[in-house]
């Protein structure tokens, strides 16, 4: 009997050698250990034999069955792995073939550099509790000049070459300060806000002059505001923008809407103060005109100057953008040339 | 404006610091020193030398070896000048001298002979213009003397002051006024040579009786005060070196002694003035009045000026002789033959001078000062100072009569007083300094009068600061703050109530649009000019030329009006970039400007998006992007044929593609369009490819907060069913129309209808569309009977609309 099982085992091992596919393997398994397989046949043939023999043979057959099952399972796993490997190989992709390798026209996407810096400045101020306001580009004489303590025929009007409309009453705002005026008119102190936006000056354009550029204006009105508070906010702004603390100096500057008025200069970031062409060999760059809001300006907008005072400042955004990225020609900003804009791509 | 430090030192002692050190301090306290120049430094090195021997150069025919006597010793130099001769006295510049133009002399070998230093021409030293040969001094020139001393051209430091930074300070448009600032900044005392004693001494020299020329000032003219003085027996000649040097330092050219005196006093004391040839004044009378009629007038610079009736003119009995505060007339100026002069020192209303000079385009040294609002109380002193100098330069001159003074400002000065406490000053600065005494000291040095009562100050403002500049306590705080140095104030955070801040709704929307279009729309953001020209509008076929928003003083015709839409500049942007890229995507968030009867103008925020592709379709990619964006923005939006184009594009604009265009309606308002640009217009712009634009007017909804659109539903407990059917559809029928046909299937269990597939068979008249309807119910599994009924309804609705089931 054991000879028979020996033979079956040898047959099985021989047969499985040649099996390559899952169906063939399943069939082989059925042939040997299925209900009608050879091992079942042996057990059937045992009918009528004495119980000891049946037990003995049964043990041998069951052992062989287990052996066959295991061998089949192992083989099955091997075949499966081979099939998967084959499939993987067949379906292999070129993992180097990124979109960026293709020339599919201009696929860069991104914000205008002025937007990038403007958002940064806005975010610094909102983080310190300042609102962000907006206002019209076409302004009237009152909001652009008179309410800012610049009456008609004031020489300070010379400082800003104004674009006038034909009625000579309306103009393109020469600074973002009218946003201040409108902000004061529509609020009750205490308040603090900034107003970013486009401003317009009637100037011949060249690499450093534009007829349209960007400013951000800001003010804070409360009780007991001081020059030292102004300095605090300006220094915070600059260190946030430049990512490090910057050396500043404050010198008197004349702007009719502030008193006292200052120019805040920063030590030239290009030459470190030694003097270079960017800072016109001064070592300092004029960056932030600012000051304590002139009592006339507060009064014009209906604010009680016995109780409240405040500071105000203005910042040229284009200058900041140019310094950040080393841009040498301001005319690119409104030029619409994507060869310029794509350099600031976000993705 | 230029400041001569030598001139300043006449009035105040300054520390021995370098020019740039002085300049830096002055910038921090008073006004911006744009440039510090040292002049005449090289003239200290250059000496008068006498030529004692001339030999031929061994290696040259033209050059000579010249031995010179420098006083202390002699030296041999190489010289190539044609006029060299023995006995000549010439300028010699030794090695180390830095010549004008920045050239430093070093020992130099000239054809084998080393020359240490050089003999100079007048041009090389900028002491004259002759460059043909050596400059020759008179025979009595002292050998060895420096040119600085011999020519009386002392070394000086010149500050170039930024004029803008002294717009509000009429007193600083004068050397003496600047000296007062130096005295305060450097805590030095100010010498006033023109004090009361000086005035009395000069007044004693005036003639007795009235002036030979009478002065009348019309009350309604721009003249506030007029001071006239008649002087006879003057001679007009060359000015002395010291005067020329100072004029030169301030950038004023020497003309003749009388004109120079006039300019000198303006530079020194800040009040412009005019000297008439008295013989040219008809009728012995000056009348300051409005011109009255339109006329022309020839000014001293020999230019004809158009005068308007309201301009104030200085007139004699017959004719105008000067434009008030701006420039004198050619008909009455001093000449070489003038013997009698009439000196005008006057003051005019700032705004009127400014108005006239701006209109004439004539900004003179005089008008620049007047428009800053000058002090009427300084005219007498200036008039006397002119007399003072005339008497110095031509001692035989003699005033006739006294000063004649007229005008509404001819009355004693009453100083305005400002009350302020030292505590207030310190609290606004945010500092615990300066001490009371220092505050008083600063104000006193600036010539303010100060009365102190336990730290409460009554500050009286001197006349030259009271014309507009110093008016309220904030001005006094500035005076103290700047002299202390704003730079010395430490930063301090305020103690304030914390309040939540959010971006405004429009700002939130704008940022979301930018974010979406960059990150999802894969576009680049551009900015274009809000001012455009007629040419661009015409090129874009734009029917609205926005002629009511034209600038009066545009830089150019190309930017002379506000844009009525973002489309024309978008076309320009696309055309520019189509040259460089086969495909690109861009957007601009900007404003369009419209005239308005009541408010003059209305500005609308718009966003324009442009997709360009030379080969592939750009319409559907952009439409998909817009649909996704509108979904992201959270406003209910409808894409279709609903009037959006009419809202944002002119009715008769021919730039829209006949088939590729749809309308956008947001929050129920027609406010946008997506369209490809008409191929004819593309041809005119020389763009090969397809450009699709989307334009959305944000102003219709940007101030409305979008409603929360997320509505949570519990996850389904029962499976739903889907039903697909394929129908035959005419080829040209829009896919959306097929789905619209299912509007009639009104089961609450119907979740959605979508397209699964579209197949284009050989028959060109039809297409086959597979449509999927999804059904589900929250509370049960849908039974077969219901599904069958629903499916039949789907099929019948499609068939009813003309889309039969494919057999």
Image: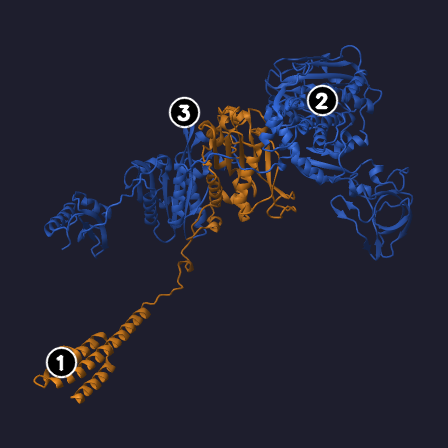
Chain colours: A orange, B blue
Spot occupied by residue B551 in the image (x, y as percentages of width and height): 49, 31
Q: Can the viewer see residue B322 in this picture?
A: no
Residue B109 place in picture, x, y as percent? 82, 55
* Residue underneath mark 1: A40
Q: Chain of mark 2?
A: B
Which mark is first along the chain, 3 or 2?
Answer: 2
Whether callout 2 and callout 3 share a subunit is answered: yes
> Badge 3: how crowded within 10 Å, few (<14), some, or many (20+)?
few
Quadrant assignment for the C terminus of chain B: bottom left
Residue B666 visible? The answer is yes
Residue tagged 3: B598
Secondary element at tag 3: loop
| Dots 3, 1 in contact, CB < 8 A | no
- Decide if residue B288 is on the left or right side of residue A320: right
Residue highlighted by disc 2: B274
Q: 10 Å neighbourhood of mark 1: few (<14), some, or many (≥20)?
A: some
Q: Nearer the viewer, mark 3 or mark 1?
A: 1
């Amino acid at each position: 009997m054991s000879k028979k099982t020996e033979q079956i085992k040898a047959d099985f091992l021989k047969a499985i050698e040649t099996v390559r596919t899952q169906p063939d393997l399943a069939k082989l398994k059925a042939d040997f250990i299925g209900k009608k397989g050879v091992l079942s046949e042996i057990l059937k043939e045992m009918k009528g034999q004495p119980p000891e023999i049946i037990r003995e043979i049964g043990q041998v057959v069951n052992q062989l069955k287990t052996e066959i099952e295991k061998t089949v399972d192992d083989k099955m796993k091997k075949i499966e792995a081979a099939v998967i490997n084959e499939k993987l190989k067949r379906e292999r992709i070129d993992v180097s073939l990124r979109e960026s390798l293709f020339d599919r026209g201009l696929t860069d996407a991104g914000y205008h550099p002025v937007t990038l810096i403007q958002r940064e400045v806005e975010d610094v101020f909102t983080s310190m509790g300042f609102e962000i306001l907006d206002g019209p580009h076409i302004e009237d004489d009152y909001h652009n000049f008179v309410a800012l303590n610049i009456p008609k025929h004031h020489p300070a009007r010379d400082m800003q070459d104004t674009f006038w409309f034909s009625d000579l009453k309306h103009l393109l705002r020469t600074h973002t300060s009218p946003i201040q005026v409108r902000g004061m008119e529509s609020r009750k102190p205490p308040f603090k806000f900034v107003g970013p936006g486009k401003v317009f000056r009637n100037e011949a354009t060249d690499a450093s002059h534009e007829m349209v550029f960007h400013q951000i204006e800001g003010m804070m009105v409360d009780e007991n505001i001081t020059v030292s508070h102004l300095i605090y906010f300006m220094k915070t702004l600059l260190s946030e923008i430049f990512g490090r603390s910057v050396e500043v100096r404050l010198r008197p500057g004349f702007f009719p809407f502030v008193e006292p008025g200052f120019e805040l200069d920063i030590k030239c970031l290009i030459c470190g103060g030694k003097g270079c062409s960017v800072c016109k060999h001064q070592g300092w760059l004029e960056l932030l005109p600012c000051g304590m809001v002139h009592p006339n300006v507060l009064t014009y907008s209906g604010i009680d100057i016995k109780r409240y005072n405040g500071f105000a400042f203005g910042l040229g955004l284009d200058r900041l953008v140019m310094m950040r990225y080393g841009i040498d020609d301001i005319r690119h900003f409104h030029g619409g040339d994507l060869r310029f804009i794509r350099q600031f791509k976000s993705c | 404006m230029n400041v001569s430090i030598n001139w300043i030192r006449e009035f105040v002692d300054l520390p021995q610091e370098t020019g740039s050190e002085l300049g830096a301090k002055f910038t921090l306290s008073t006004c911006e020193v744009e440039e510090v120049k040292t002049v005449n430094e090289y003239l200290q090195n250059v000496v008068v030398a006498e030529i004692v021997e001339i030999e031929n150069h061994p290696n040259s025919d033209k050059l000579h070896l010249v031995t010179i006597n420098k006083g202390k010793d002699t030296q041999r130099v190489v010289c190539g000048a044609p006029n060299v001769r023995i006995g000549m006295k010439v300028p010699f510049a030794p090695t180390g001298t830095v010549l004008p133009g920045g050239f430093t002399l070093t020992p130099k070998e000239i054809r084998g002979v080393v020359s240490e230093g050089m003999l100079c021409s007048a041009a090389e030293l900028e002491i004259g213009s002759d460059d043909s040969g050596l400059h020759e001094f008179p025979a009595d020139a002292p050998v060895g003397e420096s040119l600085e001393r011999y020519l009386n051209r002392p070394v000086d430091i010149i500050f170039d002051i930024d004029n803008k930074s002294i717009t509000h300070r009429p007193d600083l448009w004068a050397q003496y006024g600047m000296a007062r600032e130096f005295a305060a900044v450097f805590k030095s005392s100010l010498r006033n040579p023109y004090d009361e004693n000086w005035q009395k001494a000069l007044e004693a020299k005036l003639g007795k009786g009235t002036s030979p020329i009478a002065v009348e000032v019309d009350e309604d003219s721009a003249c506030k005060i007029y001071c006239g003085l008649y002087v006879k027996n003057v001679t007009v000649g060359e000015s002395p070196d010291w005067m020329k040097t100072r004029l030169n330092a301030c950038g004023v050219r020497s003309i003749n002694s009388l004109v120079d005196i006039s300019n000198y006093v303006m530079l020194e004391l800040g009040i412009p003035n005019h000297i008439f040839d008295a013989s040219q004044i008809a009728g012995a009378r000056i009348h300051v009045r409005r011109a009255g009629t339109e006329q022309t007038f020839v000014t001293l610079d020999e230019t004809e000026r158009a005068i308007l009736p309201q301009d104030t003119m200085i007139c004699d009995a017959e004719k105008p002789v000067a434009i008030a505060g701006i420039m004198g007339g050619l008909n009455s100026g001093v000449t070489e033959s003038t013997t009698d002069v009439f000196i005008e020192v006057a003051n005019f209303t700032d705004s009127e001078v400014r108005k006239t000079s701006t209109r004439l385009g004539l900004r003179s040294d005089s008008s620049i000062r007047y428009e800053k609002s000058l002090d009427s109380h300084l005219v007498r002193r200036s008039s006397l100072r002119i007399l003072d100098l005339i008497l110095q330069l031509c001692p035989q001159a003699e005033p006739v009569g006294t000063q004649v003074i007229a005008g509404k400002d001819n009355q004693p000065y009453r100083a305005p007083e400002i009350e302020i406490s030292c505590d207030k000053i310190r609290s606004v600065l945010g500092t615990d300094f300066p001490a009371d005494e220092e505050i008083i000291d600063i104000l006193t040095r600036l010539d303010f009068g100060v009365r102190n009562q336990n730290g409460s100050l009554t500050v009286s403002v001197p006349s030259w600061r009271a014309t507009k500049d110093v008016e309220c306590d904030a001005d006094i705080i500035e005076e103290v703050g700047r002299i202390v140095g704003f730079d010395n104030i430490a930063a301090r955070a305020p103690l304030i109530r914390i309040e939540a801040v959010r971006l405004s709704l429009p700002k939130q929307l704008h940022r979301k649009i930018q974010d979406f279009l960059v990150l999802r729309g894969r576009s680049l953001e551009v900015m274009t000019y809000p001012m455009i020209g007629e040419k661009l509008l015409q090129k874009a076929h734009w029917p609205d030329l926005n002629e009511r928003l034209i600038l009066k003083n545009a830089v150019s015709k190309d930017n002379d009006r506000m844009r009525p839409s973002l489309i024309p500049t978008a076309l320009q942007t696309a055309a520019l970039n189509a040259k460089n890229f086969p495909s690109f995507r861009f957007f601009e968030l900007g404003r369009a400007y419209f005239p308005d009867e009541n408010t003059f103008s209305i500005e609308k925020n718009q966003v324009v998006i442009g997709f360009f592709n030379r080969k592939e379709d750009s319409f559907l990619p952009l439409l998909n992007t817009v649909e996704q964006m509108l979904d992201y923005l959270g406003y209910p939006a409808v894409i279709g044929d609903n009037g959006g184009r009419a809202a944002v594009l002119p009715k008769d604009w021919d730039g829209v593609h006949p088939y590729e265009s749809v309308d956008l309606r947001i929050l129920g308002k027609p406010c946008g369009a997506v369209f490809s640009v008409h191929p004819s217009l593309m041809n005119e712009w020389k763009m090969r490819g397809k450009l699709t634009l989307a334009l959305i007017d944000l102003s219709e909804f940007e101030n409305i907060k979008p409603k929360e659109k997320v509505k949570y539903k519990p996850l389904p407990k029962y499976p739903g069913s889907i039903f697909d059917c394929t129908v035959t559809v005419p080829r040209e029928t829009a896919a959306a129309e097929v789905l619209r046909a299912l509007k009639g299937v009104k089961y609450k269990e119907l979740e959605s209808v979508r397209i699964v597939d579209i197949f284009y068979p050989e028959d060109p008249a039809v297409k086959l569309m597979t449509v999927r309807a999804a059904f589900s119910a929250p509370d049960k599994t849908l039974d077969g009977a219901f599904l069958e009924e629903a499916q039949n309804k789907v099929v019948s609705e499609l068939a009813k609309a003309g889309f039969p089931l494919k057999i």
